[in-house]
Image (cartoon, rainbow, N blue to C red):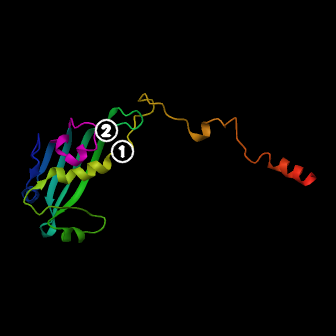
């Protein structure tokens, strides 16, 4: 088992042939597309992956990834940390054609190279796992939360442009 700080690329075929696992950490800054969405790139992702070879030399990877990611609270615009946890269960295929042959409920990753990038394997799922609108828990930030529409008081001074129309019509009929 490979542990500690993980290399960015591993020989997935060799690992699968011997049913080996890798466990360790990857720096958040190595996830370049993910980093563009974050407020900071300090920290590491904790990764545990098990590779195995199935029938017809098919290669499967299963595992978990957990990362504490720095995002911007959309209420107060201050940085905050969210914990993202992923479950990985994919087949590694050699081409897009092989990917299209997988059943619809199966996940696949294309890698024709002899070594797979762990960043490529995890990055899309980390991006999808980010909250769409990150916010502190209730009372966790100093932002003033606006009142809901139904909580607002009804406007006192309402302008009614046709309020005098009925009276004018009556006056016109009398004259």
Element marked by disc 2:
strand
Specify start and end residues of the magenta stretch as a single range: 25-43
Where on the picture, by quarter, is residue 36? top left
Q: Which residue is mark 2?
A: 71
Q: Residue at x 22, y 59 (%)?
A: 90
Mark 2 residue crowding within 10 angstroms, few (<14) / some (14–19) / many (20+): many
Q: Nearer the viewer, mark 2 or mark 1?
A: 2
Q: In the rendering, at what x and y percent does residue 153 appear?
A: 64, 35
Q: In the rendering, at what x and y percent does residue 46 appear?
A: 20, 41
How many angstroms separate mark 2 from mark 1 (CA)?
9 Å
Element marked by disc 1:
loop
- In the image, 94 versus 164, the foreground residue is 164
Earlier in the chain: of badge 2 and badge 1, it is: 2
Q: Which mark is residue 131?
A: 1
Mark 1 residue crowding within 10 angstroms, few (<14) / some (14–19) / many (20+): few
Q: Is 55 on the left or on the right of 73, as rendered?
A: left
Q: Residue at x 16, y 44 (%)?
A: 30
The answer to whether residue 34 is magenta is yes
44 relative to 174, above or below: above
**Callout 2–callout 1 Cβ contact below 8 Å:** yes
């Amino acid at each position: 088992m490979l542990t500690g700080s993980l290399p960015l690329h591993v020989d997935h075929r060799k690992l699968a042939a011997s049913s080996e696992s890798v466990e360790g950490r990857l720096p958040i800054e190595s996830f370049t597309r993910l980093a563009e969405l974050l407020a900071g790139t300090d920290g590491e992702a904790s990764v545990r992956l098990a590779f195995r070879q199935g029938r017809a030399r098919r290669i499967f990877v299963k595992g978990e990834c957990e990362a504490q990611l720095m995002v911007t609270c959309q209420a107060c615009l201050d940085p905050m940390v969210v914990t993202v946890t992923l479950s990985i269960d994919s087949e590694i295929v050699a081409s897009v054609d092989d990917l299209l042959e997988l059943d619809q409920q199966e996940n696949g990753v294309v890698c024709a190279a002899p070594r797979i990038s762990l960043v490529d394997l995890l990055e899309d799922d980390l991006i999808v796992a980010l909250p769409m609108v990150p916010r502190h828990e209730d009372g966790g930030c100093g932002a003033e939360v606006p009142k809901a529409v139904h909580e607002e008081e009804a406007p006192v001074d309402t302008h009614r442009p046709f309020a005098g129309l009925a009276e004018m019509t009556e006056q016109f009929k009398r004259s």
